[in-house]
Protein backbone atom coordinates (compact mmCIF):
# COMPACT_ATOMS: atom_id res chain seq x y z
CA UNK A 1 0.00 0.00 0.00
CA UNK A 2 2.69 2.46 1.10
CA UNK A 3 4.95 1.33 -1.69
CA UNK A 4 2.18 1.90 -4.15
CA UNK A 5 1.53 5.31 -2.77
CA UNK A 6 5.16 6.32 -3.04
CA UNK A 7 5.25 4.95 -6.52
CA UNK A 8 2.17 6.91 -7.43
CA UNK A 9 3.70 10.12 -6.07
CA UNK A 10 6.87 9.51 -8.02
CA UNK A 11 4.89 8.97 -11.16
CA UNK A 12 2.94 12.11 -10.53
CA UNK A 13 6.15 14.03 -9.97
CA UNK A 14 7.67 12.72 -13.20
CA UNK A 15 4.50 13.51 -15.10
CA UNK A 16 4.49 17.01 -13.67
CA UNK A 17 8.12 17.53 -14.49
CA UNK A 18 7.59 16.41 -18.07
CA UNK A 19 4.55 18.63 -18.29
CA UNK A 20 6.52 21.68 -17.15
CA UNK A 21 9.39 20.93 -19.48
CA UNK A 22 7.07 20.66 -22.44
CA UNK A 23 5.08 23.70 -21.35
CA UNK A 24 8.31 25.63 -20.91
CA UNK A 25 9.41 24.67 -24.39
CA UNK A 26 6.05 25.55 -25.88
CA UNK A 27 6.31 29.02 -24.33
CA UNK A 28 9.83 29.42 -25.59
CA UNK A 29 9.01 28.08 -28.98
CA UNK A 30 6.09 30.18 -29.99
CA UNK A 31 7.85 33.30 -31.19
CA UNK A 32 5.80 35.46 -33.53
CA UNK A 33 8.01 34.52 -36.44
CA UNK A 34 10.20 31.48 -37.01
CA UNK A 35 12.32 31.69 -40.13
CA UNK A 36 11.28 29.10 -42.68
CA UNK A 37 14.76 28.95 -44.18
CA UNK A 38 18.11 27.85 -42.87
CA UNK A 39 20.52 30.69 -42.21
CA UNK A 40 23.98 31.26 -40.80
CA UNK A 41 22.89 33.52 -37.95
CA UNK A 42 19.91 31.46 -36.83
CA UNK A 43 21.02 31.08 -33.20
CA UNK A 44 23.21 34.20 -32.98
CA UNK A 45 20.91 35.97 -30.54
CA UNK A 46 19.08 32.97 -29.04
CA UNK A 47 22.21 30.90 -28.30
CA UNK A 48 25.39 32.90 -28.90
CA UNK A 49 27.65 30.26 -27.35
CA UNK A 50 26.31 27.42 -29.50
CA UNK A 51 29.36 26.73 -31.63
CA UNK A 52 31.68 27.05 -28.64
CA UNK A 53 29.62 24.50 -26.69
CA UNK A 54 29.44 22.02 -29.58
CA UNK A 55 33.15 22.39 -30.32
CA UNK A 56 34.02 21.84 -26.68
CA UNK A 57 31.83 18.71 -26.59
CA UNK A 58 33.39 17.26 -29.73
CA UNK A 59 36.93 18.17 -28.69
CA UNK A 60 36.64 16.44 -25.33
CA UNK A 61 34.94 13.40 -26.88
CA UNK A 62 37.87 13.04 -29.33
CA UNK A 63 40.38 13.44 -26.49
CA UNK A 64 38.68 10.47 -24.79
CA UNK A 65 38.22 8.35 -27.94
CA UNK A 66 39.94 9.26 -31.19
CA UNK A 67 37.49 7.17 -33.26
CA UNK A 68 34.53 9.26 -32.15
CA UNK A 69 35.16 11.92 -34.83
CA UNK A 70 34.43 9.31 -37.50
CA UNK A 71 31.41 8.06 -35.59
CA UNK A 72 29.91 11.55 -35.33
CA UNK A 73 30.39 12.14 -39.04
CA UNK A 74 28.60 8.89 -39.86
CA UNK A 75 25.81 9.64 -37.37
CA UNK A 76 24.96 12.83 -39.28
CA UNK A 77 24.99 10.92 -42.61
CA UNK A 78 22.66 8.26 -41.23
CA UNK A 79 20.35 10.96 -39.89
CA UNK A 80 20.12 12.88 -43.16
CA UNK A 81 19.60 9.87 -45.45
CA UNK A 82 16.53 8.68 -43.55
CA UNK A 83 13.55 11.06 -43.72
CA UNK A 84 15.94 13.99 -44.07
CA UNK A 85 18.10 15.65 -41.42
CA UNK A 86 15.60 15.56 -38.55
CA UNK A 87 17.44 13.67 -35.78
CA UNK A 88 15.11 10.71 -36.38
CA UNK A 89 18.08 8.41 -35.79
CA UNK A 90 18.26 9.58 -32.16
CA UNK A 91 14.72 8.51 -31.25
CA UNK A 92 14.44 5.42 -29.07
CA UNK A 93 11.90 2.71 -29.83
CA UNK A 94 8.61 3.08 -27.96
CA UNK A 95 5.42 1.01 -27.92
CA UNK A 96 4.12 3.07 -30.84
CA UNK A 97 7.35 3.86 -32.68
CA UNK A 98 9.85 1.50 -34.29
CA UNK A 99 12.89 3.72 -34.51
CA UNK A 100 16.09 3.60 -36.56
CA UNK A 101 18.63 2.61 -33.92
CA UNK A 102 17.88 -1.08 -34.49
CA UNK A 103 17.83 -0.94 -38.29
CA UNK A 104 20.46 -3.20 -39.92
CA UNK A 105 22.91 -0.44 -40.94
CA UNK A 106 22.74 1.14 -37.46
CA UNK A 107 22.46 -1.60 -34.85
CA UNK A 108 25.75 -2.39 -33.08
CA UNK A 109 27.42 -0.10 -35.58
CA UNK A 110 26.44 3.55 -35.22
CA UNK A 111 28.21 5.25 -32.31
CA UNK A 112 28.27 8.68 -30.69
CA UNK A 113 24.78 8.98 -29.23
CA UNK A 114 26.13 9.86 -25.76
CA UNK A 115 28.25 12.68 -27.16
CA UNK A 116 25.17 14.32 -28.67
CA UNK A 117 23.31 13.88 -25.38
CA UNK A 118 26.11 15.52 -23.45
CA UNK A 119 26.18 18.50 -25.81
CA UNK A 120 22.38 18.78 -25.68
CA UNK A 121 22.51 18.82 -21.88
CA UNK A 122 25.03 21.68 -21.93
CA UNK A 123 22.90 23.55 -24.46
CA UNK A 124 19.74 23.14 -22.38
CA UNK A 125 21.68 24.81 -19.55
CA UNK A 126 22.87 27.68 -21.72
CA UNK A 127 19.79 28.22 -23.90
CA UNK A 128 16.85 25.98 -23.00
CA UNK A 129 14.45 24.72 -25.68
CA UNK A 130 16.35 26.49 -28.43
CA UNK A 131 18.73 24.28 -30.39
CA UNK A 132 17.44 21.28 -32.35
CA UNK A 133 19.09 17.88 -32.01
CA UNK A 134 19.58 17.70 -35.78
CA UNK A 135 21.46 21.02 -35.83
CA UNK A 136 23.66 19.58 -33.09
CA UNK A 137 24.35 16.52 -35.29
CA UNK A 138 25.19 18.81 -38.21
CA UNK A 139 27.55 21.02 -36.20
CA UNK A 140 29.16 18.03 -34.45
CA UNK A 141 29.95 16.39 -37.81
CA UNK A 142 31.47 19.63 -39.06
CA UNK A 143 33.64 20.02 -35.96
CA UNK A 144 34.63 16.36 -36.07
CA UNK A 145 36.05 16.78 -39.58
CA UNK A 146 37.75 20.06 -38.71
CA UNK A 147 39.37 18.69 -35.54
CA UNK A 148 40.62 15.70 -37.55
CA UNK A 149 42.62 17.99 -39.81
CA UNK A 150 39.97 18.27 -42.50
CA UNK A 151 38.35 21.31 -44.06
CA UNK A 152 36.07 23.81 -42.34
CA UNK A 153 32.87 24.90 -44.02
CA UNK A 154 30.16 27.15 -42.59
CA UNK A 155 26.73 25.59 -42.09
CA UNK A 156 23.36 27.29 -42.19
CA UNK A 157 21.17 26.41 -39.20
CA UNK A 158 17.53 26.30 -38.20
CA UNK A 159 16.71 22.64 -38.87
CA UNK A 160 13.97 21.31 -36.63
CA UNK A 161 13.55 17.84 -35.14
CA UNK A 162 11.15 15.29 -36.56
CA UNK A 163 8.38 13.72 -34.53
CA UNK A 164 8.74 10.28 -36.08
CA UNK A 165 11.34 7.78 -37.27
CA UNK A 166 11.35 4.80 -39.61
CA UNK A 167 13.21 1.53 -39.26
CA UNK A 168 12.07 0.51 -42.75
CA UNK A 169 13.33 3.73 -44.33
CA UNK A 170 16.69 3.22 -42.59
CA UNK A 171 16.92 -0.32 -44.00
CA UNK A 172 15.86 0.79 -47.48
CA UNK A 173 17.57 4.14 -47.97
CA UNK A 174 21.03 3.73 -46.42
CA UNK A 175 23.62 2.32 -48.84
CA UNK A 176 25.05 -1.13 -48.17
CA UNK A 177 28.72 -2.05 -48.75
CA UNK A 178 27.54 -5.16 -50.63
CA UNK A 179 25.51 -3.51 -53.35
CA UNK A 180 26.83 -2.46 -56.77
CA UNK A 181 27.76 1.14 -57.56
CA UNK A 182 24.56 1.66 -59.62
CA UNK A 183 22.44 0.86 -56.58
CA UNK A 184 24.45 3.17 -54.32
CA UNK A 185 24.25 5.92 -56.92
CA UNK A 186 20.49 5.46 -57.15
CA UNK A 187 20.14 5.82 -53.37
CA UNK A 188 22.14 9.06 -53.45
CA UNK A 189 20.14 10.33 -56.45
CA UNK A 190 16.92 9.71 -54.52
CA UNK A 191 18.25 12.25 -51.99
CA UNK A 192 19.23 14.79 -54.63
CA UNK A 193 22.91 13.84 -54.62
CA UNK A 194 24.85 13.13 -57.81
CA UNK A 195 27.69 10.82 -58.82
CA UNK A 196 30.32 13.33 -57.74
CA UNK A 197 28.69 13.54 -54.30
CA UNK A 198 28.93 9.73 -54.06
CA UNK A 199 32.67 9.84 -54.73
CA UNK A 200 33.47 12.89 -52.61
CA UNK A 201 31.39 11.81 -49.62
CA UNK A 202 32.87 8.31 -49.75
CA UNK A 203 36.07 10.19 -48.87
CA UNK A 204 34.63 10.27 -45.32
CA UNK A 205 36.12 6.78 -45.14
CA UNK A 206 39.49 8.47 -44.67
CA UNK A 207 38.69 8.16 -40.94
CA UNK A 208 37.14 5.46 -38.81
CA UNK A 209 36.76 1.70 -38.76
CA UNK A 210 34.68 -1.11 -40.22
CA UNK A 211 33.77 -4.50 -38.75
CA UNK A 212 35.13 -7.58 -40.54
CA UNK A 213 31.70 -8.80 -41.67
CA UNK A 214 31.32 -5.69 -43.83
CA UNK A 215 34.20 -6.73 -46.12
CA UNK A 216 34.99 -10.36 -45.26
CA UNK A 217 33.58 -11.93 -48.43
CA UNK A 218 36.29 -10.01 -50.30
CA UNK A 219 38.94 -11.90 -48.32
CA UNK A 220 37.73 -15.48 -48.78
CA UNK A 221 34.80 -15.93 -51.12
CA UNK A 222 34.28 -12.97 -53.41
CA UNK A 223 31.00 -13.20 -55.36
CA UNK A 224 30.78 -16.88 -54.32
CA UNK A 225 33.92 -17.63 -56.38
CA UNK A 226 35.63 -19.44 -53.50
CA UNK A 227 38.54 -16.99 -53.98
CA UNK A 228 39.46 -13.52 -52.66
CA UNK A 229 38.55 -10.37 -54.59
CA UNK A 230 41.18 -10.31 -57.38
CA UNK A 231 41.22 -6.50 -57.27
CA UNK A 232 42.45 -6.37 -53.65
CA UNK A 233 46.16 -5.66 -53.20
CA UNK A 234 47.77 -8.97 -52.14
CA UNK A 235 49.81 -7.70 -49.19
CA UNK A 236 46.72 -5.95 -47.80
CA UNK A 237 44.75 -9.17 -48.37
CA UNK A 238 47.16 -11.13 -46.17
CA UNK A 239 47.01 -8.50 -43.43
CA UNK A 240 43.22 -8.40 -43.47
CA UNK A 241 42.95 -12.20 -43.43
CA UNK A 242 44.95 -12.10 -40.19
CA UNK A 243 42.63 -9.51 -38.64
CA UNK A 244 39.52 -11.28 -39.91
CA UNK A 245 40.08 -15.05 -39.98
CA UNK A 246 37.44 -17.04 -41.89
CA UNK A 247 35.30 -17.82 -38.82
CA UNK A 248 32.14 -16.23 -37.60
CA UNK A 249 33.74 -15.07 -34.36
CA UNK A 250 35.87 -12.54 -36.22
CA UNK A 251 32.81 -10.76 -37.64
CA UNK A 252 32.90 -7.85 -35.22
CA UNK A 253 36.67 -7.30 -35.19
CA UNK A 254 37.70 -3.90 -36.54
CA UNK A 255 39.92 -2.74 -39.38
CA UNK A 256 40.69 0.90 -40.19
CA UNK A 257 39.08 2.22 -43.37
CA UNK A 258 42.34 4.11 -44.01
CA UNK A 259 45.14 2.30 -42.12
CA UNK A 260 47.81 4.88 -43.07
CA UNK A 261 46.19 7.83 -41.25
CA UNK A 262 43.07 6.39 -39.62
CA UNK A 263 42.35 9.45 -37.45
CA UNK A 264 43.39 12.08 -39.94
CA UNK A 265 40.96 13.56 -42.41
CA UNK A 266 43.07 13.70 -45.59
CA UNK A 267 43.01 12.37 -49.16
CA UNK A 268 44.93 9.15 -48.43
CA UNK A 269 41.64 7.24 -48.86
CA UNK A 270 41.70 8.14 -52.57
CA UNK A 271 45.39 7.28 -52.92
CA UNK A 272 44.60 3.88 -51.46
CA UNK A 273 41.78 3.28 -53.94
CA UNK A 274 44.22 4.01 -56.77
CA UNK A 275 46.54 1.44 -55.11
CA UNK A 276 43.80 -1.24 -55.01
CA UNK A 277 43.73 -0.91 -51.22
CA UNK A 278 40.18 0.20 -50.50
CA UNK A 279 38.65 -1.71 -47.59
CA UNK A 280 34.97 -2.02 -48.52
CA UNK A 281 33.81 -3.38 -51.84
CA UNK A 282 31.74 -0.17 -52.14
CA UNK A 283 34.98 1.83 -51.78
CA UNK A 284 37.03 -0.07 -54.35
CA UNK A 285 34.25 -0.13 -56.98
CA UNK A 286 34.77 3.60 -57.37
CA UNK A 287 37.85 2.59 -59.40
CA UNK A 288 35.80 0.16 -61.50
CA UNK A 289 33.95 2.82 -63.47
CA UNK A 290 35.79 5.25 -65.72
CA UNK A 291 33.84 8.35 -64.62
CA UNK A 292 34.21 7.75 -60.89
CA UNK A 293 37.80 6.52 -61.31
CA UNK A 294 38.85 9.81 -62.87
CA UNK A 295 37.32 11.68 -59.92
CA UNK A 296 39.15 9.38 -57.47
CA UNK A 297 42.44 10.00 -59.28
CA UNK A 298 41.99 13.77 -59.20
CA UNK A 299 41.17 13.73 -55.45
CA UNK A 300 44.20 11.51 -54.85
CA UNK A 301 46.36 14.19 -56.49
CA UNK A 302 44.73 17.38 -55.30
CA UNK A 303 43.92 17.40 -51.57
CA UNK A 304 42.63 20.97 -51.69
CA UNK A 305 40.15 20.05 -54.40
CA UNK A 306 38.91 17.18 -52.22
CA UNK A 307 38.58 19.49 -49.18
CA UNK A 308 36.63 22.07 -51.14
CA UNK A 309 34.31 19.56 -52.80
CA UNK A 310 33.79 17.64 -49.57
CA UNK A 311 32.51 20.76 -47.79
CA UNK A 312 30.17 21.54 -50.69
CA UNK A 313 28.74 18.00 -50.75
CA UNK A 314 28.34 17.98 -46.96
CA UNK A 315 26.27 21.16 -47.22
CA UNK A 316 24.05 19.44 -49.80
CA UNK A 317 23.68 16.42 -47.54
CA UNK A 318 22.88 18.60 -44.53
CA UNK A 319 20.02 20.17 -46.48
CA UNK A 320 18.21 16.92 -47.33
CA UNK A 321 14.54 17.11 -46.35
CA UNK A 322 14.99 19.61 -43.53
CA UNK A 323 12.07 20.80 -41.39
CA UNK A 324 12.00 24.56 -40.83
CA UNK A 325 9.65 27.31 -39.67
CA UNK A 326 6.74 25.85 -37.72
CA UNK A 327 7.35 22.27 -38.87
CA UNK A 328 8.73 19.69 -36.48
CA UNK A 329 9.83 20.72 -33.01
CA UNK A 330 12.84 21.43 -30.81
CA UNK A 331 13.18 18.27 -28.76
CA UNK A 332 13.93 18.77 -25.10
CA UNK A 333 15.56 15.35 -24.93
CA UNK A 334 17.02 13.99 -28.18
CA UNK A 335 15.82 10.45 -27.41
CA UNK A 336 12.11 11.22 -27.24
CA UNK A 337 9.52 13.33 -28.99
CA UNK A 338 8.28 16.18 -26.74
C1 LIG B 1 28.73 5.42 -50.35
C2 LIG B 1 28.06 4.56 -49.62
C3 LIG B 1 28.52 4.16 -48.25
C4 LIG B 1 28.58 2.88 -47.78
C5 LIG B 1 28.18 1.61 -48.53
C6 LIG B 1 29.11 2.95 -46.45
C7 LIG B 1 29.30 1.85 -45.63
C8 LIG B 1 29.96 1.88 -44.42
C9 LIG B 1 30.22 0.72 -43.61
C10 LIG B 1 29.80 -0.71 -43.94
C11 LIG B 1 30.93 1.13 -42.53
C12 LIG B 1 31.43 0.27 -41.38
C13 LIG B 1 30.31 0.09 -40.36
C14 LIG B 1 30.60 -0.99 -39.34
O1 LIG B 1 31.45 -1.84 -39.59
O2 LIG B 1 29.98 -0.98 -38.26
C15 LIG B 1 31.10 2.55 -42.65
C16 LIG B 1 31.78 3.34 -41.74
C17 LIG B 1 31.88 4.71 -41.84
N1 LIG B 1 31.22 5.51 -42.76
FE1 LIG B 1 30.33 4.88 -44.46
N2 LIG B 1 29.36 4.24 -46.12
C18 LIG B 1 29.00 5.02 -47.18
C19 LIG B 1 29.04 6.40 -47.25
C20 LIG B 1 29.42 7.21 -46.20
C21 LIG B 1 29.22 8.64 -46.14
C22 LIG B 1 28.49 9.46 -47.20
C23 LIG B 1 29.76 9.07 -44.97
C24 LIG B 1 29.81 10.46 -44.39
C25 LIG B 1 29.77 11.56 -45.10
C26 LIG B 1 30.32 7.91 -44.31
C27 LIG B 1 31.04 7.93 -43.14
C28 LIG B 1 31.53 6.81 -42.50
C29 LIG B 1 32.47 6.87 -41.39
C30 LIG B 1 33.13 8.12 -40.86
C31 LIG B 1 32.66 5.55 -40.96
C32 LIG B 1 33.51 5.07 -39.77
C33 LIG B 1 32.62 5.14 -38.53
C34 LIG B 1 33.26 4.73 -37.22
O3 LIG B 1 34.44 4.39 -37.17
O4 LIG B 1 32.52 4.76 -36.20
N3 LIG B 1 30.07 6.80 -45.06
N4 LIG B 1 30.49 2.99 -43.79
C1 LIG C 1 29.01 32.42 -23.11
O1 LIG C 1 30.13 31.84 -22.49
C2 LIG C 1 30.87 32.77 -21.69
C3 LIG C 1 32.11 32.08 -21.13
O2 LIG C 1 32.35 30.85 -21.74
C4 LIG C 1 30.00 33.26 -20.56
O3 LIG C 1 30.73 34.20 -19.78
C5 LIG C 1 28.77 33.92 -21.14
O4 LIG C 1 27.90 34.29 -20.08
C6 LIG C 1 28.05 32.98 -22.07
N1 LIG C 1 26.98 33.73 -22.74
C7 LIG C 1 25.73 33.31 -22.73
C8 LIG C 1 24.73 34.19 -23.42
O5 LIG C 1 25.38 32.24 -22.25
C1 LIG D 1 35.17 7.48 -23.53
O1 LIG D 1 35.08 6.64 -24.66
C2 LIG D 1 34.58 5.34 -24.39
C3 LIG D 1 34.66 4.55 -25.68
O2 LIG D 1 33.94 5.19 -26.70
C4 LIG D 1 33.16 5.45 -23.86
O3 LIG D 1 32.65 4.17 -23.56
C5 LIG D 1 33.14 6.32 -22.63
O4 LIG D 1 31.80 6.54 -22.22
C6 LIG D 1 33.80 7.67 -22.91
N1 LIG D 1 33.93 8.43 -21.67
C7 LIG D 1 33.63 9.72 -21.62
C8 LIG D 1 33.83 10.37 -20.29
O5 LIG D 1 33.20 10.35 -22.57
C1 LIG E 1 20.24 -3.41 -56.88
O1 LIG E 1 19.04 -2.80 -57.30
C2 LIG E 1 18.21 -3.66 -58.05
C3 LIG E 1 17.06 -2.82 -58.60
O2 LIG E 1 16.49 -2.08 -57.58
C4 LIG E 1 17.75 -4.82 -57.17
O3 LIG E 1 16.91 -5.68 -57.89
C5 LIG E 1 18.98 -5.57 -56.67
O4 LIG E 1 18.59 -6.56 -55.75
C6 LIG E 1 19.96 -4.64 -55.99
N1 LIG E 1 21.20 -5.36 -55.71
C7 LIG E 1 21.70 -5.48 -54.49
C8 LIG E 1 22.92 -6.33 -54.37
O5 LIG E 1 21.22 -4.95 -53.50
C1 LIG F 1 31.39 -19.55 -51.25
O1 LIG F 1 30.05 -19.20 -51.08
C2 LIG F 1 29.16 -20.06 -51.76
C3 LIG F 1 27.75 -19.50 -51.60
O2 LIG F 1 27.50 -19.15 -50.28
C4 LIG F 1 29.29 -21.48 -51.19
O3 LIG F 1 28.42 -22.35 -51.88
C5 LIG F 1 30.72 -21.94 -51.33
O4 LIG F 1 30.88 -23.20 -50.70
C6 LIG F 1 31.68 -20.94 -50.70
N1 LIG F 1 33.03 -21.33 -51.01
C7 LIG F 1 34.01 -21.32 -50.11
C8 LIG F 1 35.35 -21.76 -50.56
O5 LIG F 1 33.83 -20.93 -48.96
C1 LIG G 1 50.65 3.25 -53.23
O1 LIG G 1 51.56 2.29 -53.80
C2 LIG G 1 52.87 2.80 -54.00
C3 LIG G 1 53.65 1.74 -54.73
O2 LIG G 1 53.47 0.48 -54.16
C4 LIG G 1 53.46 3.12 -52.62
O3 LIG G 1 54.76 3.65 -52.77
C5 LIG G 1 52.58 4.15 -51.93
O4 LIG G 1 53.05 4.38 -50.62
C6 LIG G 1 51.15 3.66 -51.87
N1 LIG G 1 50.34 4.74 -51.35
C7 LIG G 1 49.51 4.57 -50.35
C8 LIG G 1 48.74 5.76 -49.94
O5 LIG G 1 49.36 3.51 -49.77
Image (tube, rainbow, N blue to C red):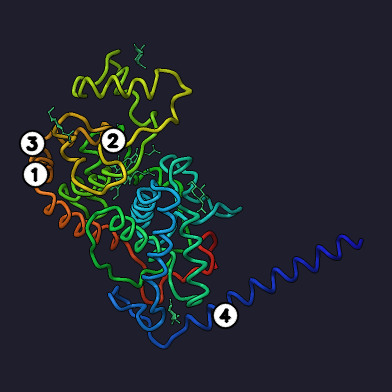
Q: Which residue is mark 2?
A: 259
- The earlier-in-sequence mark between 3 and 2 is 2
Residue 169 visible here? no
- The earlier-in-sequence mark between 1 and 4 is 4
225 versus 116 height, above or below:
above
CA–CA distance between discs 2 and 4? 48 Å
Task: Say what secondary structure mark 2 lies in.
Answer: loop
Do residues under tags 3 and 2 come within 8 Å of each other at their CB atoms? no
Do residues under tags 1 and 2 come within 8 Å of each other at their CB atoms? no
Please tell me whether mark 2 or mark 4 is closer to you in this view: 2
Please tell me whether mark 1 or mark 3 is closer to you in this view: 1
What numbered label is drawn on residue 24? 4
- The earlier-in-sequence mark between 1 and 2 is 2
Q: Quadrant of the N terminus?
A: bottom right
Q: Is mark 2 within 8 Å of ligand 6?
A: no
Badge 1 local density, few (<14 within 10 Å), some, or many (20+)? some
Q: Residue at x 46, y 47 (%)?
A: 167
CA–CA distance between discs 1 and 3? 17 Å
Q: Which residue is mark 1?
A: 301
Q: Residue at x 20, y 54 (%)?
A: 310
* Horizontal relation, residue 163 to residue 190: left or right: right
Amino acid sequence: MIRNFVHFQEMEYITHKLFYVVLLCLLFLSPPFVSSQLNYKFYDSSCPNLSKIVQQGVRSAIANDSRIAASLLRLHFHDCFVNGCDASILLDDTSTLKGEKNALPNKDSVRGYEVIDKIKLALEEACPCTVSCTDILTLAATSAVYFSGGPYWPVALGRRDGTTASEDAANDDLPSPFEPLENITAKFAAKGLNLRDVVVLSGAHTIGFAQCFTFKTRLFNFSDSGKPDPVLDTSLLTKLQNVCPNQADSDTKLAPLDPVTSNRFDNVYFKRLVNKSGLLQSDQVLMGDSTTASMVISYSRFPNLFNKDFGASMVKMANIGVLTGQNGQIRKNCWVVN
